Amino acid sequence: MRLHFSQVQTRPLAERANKVRLADFAVPTEAAPDPLPLLPNILVGRDFPAFVQAVADARRAGRPFVLMIGGHVIKTGLSLLIIDLMRRGLVTHLAANGSVSIHDFEIALIGETSEDVEANLPDGRFGNWEETGAGVNTAVNAGAAEGLGYGAAVGRYIAENDLPHADASVFAQAWRLGIPATVHVAFGNDIIHQHPAWDAGAMGAATGRDFHLLTETVADLDGGALMNLGSAVVLPETFLKALSVARNLTGGKPQAFTNAVFDMVRQYRPLVNVAQRPTASGGEGARGYVFTGHHEILFPLFYCALRRATD
């Protein structure tokens, strides 16, 4: 059966029930409590402060801290903490998969996100929401035509159109701060690829530019740090390829950096492609850590500890 995506029927977001609200997000405080004195100096209780210190040392030395995130990070209410770290100059590059741009856009537009997939899948409503598909695709299509990457295009659109909750958008704030924010997409993975406004060529060009931009950041990662927070496949795979290209073009750099995986379960690709393989040849200057637990608990602990280590 020949199907024409131009005939997909979309529905307004006003008809959709959402599971996540901006009102429930974690909010930064002026004085961050220090969780590290409560940790035992044993196993992961020893590793967690070591990673925090590595990130703090990297930023003091002017080296990068790359934060890679999956969509669940936005859905667990962590956007405002990430934005605060960007404003403080602690996150220097934000890398995301495609779902992040969708949830971030919806938060900026309506202050809510995360539909009930099981309820909407039987009749084909799942993912077919007009404002989300039209807005993100319009942003990417226009940005691609002007030579922007996907992340910058979405950030610019949210910021310049002054969406109602733009201050809670990680992409809008990255755009305003001049921080690289890149989106790395697998076609068919995201609901906006179902929308009639989707232009695969434009999105391919935009996400391709973002791969180049991430690779340039990775090439300068010596002495820096990187965290993979909640991406099981796309970002670990993208990072590994960016690292290989960087080493190919620079004669083997970078080698000496610190990586960490923060996720709810231990999974193969984050473990080997972020924590193990990239740091295996770096000697004493390279370390890889794995921290397992819920994003909405682990990342606020990291946020507070890094604030205390750098304030």
Image (cartoon, rainbow, N blue to C red):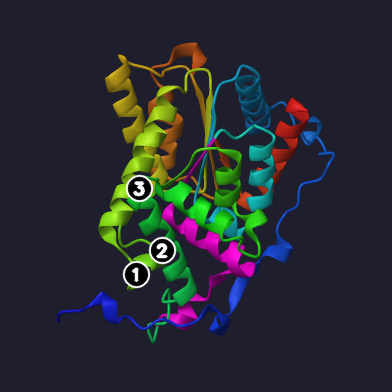
Sequence-wise first label, 3 or 1: 1
Q: Residue at x 59, y 20 (%)?
A: 62
Query: What is the three-letter code of the residue carrying label 2?
Result: Thr
> How far apart are labels 3 and 1 at the CA level?
17 Å
Question: Which residues fall within the magenta stretch?
Answer: 93-121
**Residue holding disc 2:** 138
Disc on res. 197: 1
Quarter of the picture holding the N terminus? bottom left
Please state which of the two labelled residues, at mark 3 or mark 1, is closer to the viewer. Answer: 1
> Quick check: 272 left or right of 167?
left
Sequence-wise first label, 1 or 2: 2
Query: Which quadrant holds residue 192?
Result: bottom left
Image coordinates for residue 161, horizontal then vertical, percent: 56, 61
Residue 136 seen from this side? yes
| Crowd rating for badge 1 (residues with CA inside 10 Å; few <14, some 14–19, many 20+) | some
**Residue holding disc 3:** 207
The answer to whether mark 1 and mark 2 are in CB contact below 8 A is: yes
Image coordinates for residue 9, horizontal then vertical, percent: 36, 83
Does residue 47 sit above or below 62 in this rendering? below
Q: In the image, is residue 112 part of the stretch drawn in magenta? A: yes
Residue 272 seen from this side? no
Query: What is the three-letter code of the residue carrying label 3?
Result: Thr
Sequence-wise first label, 3 or 2: 2
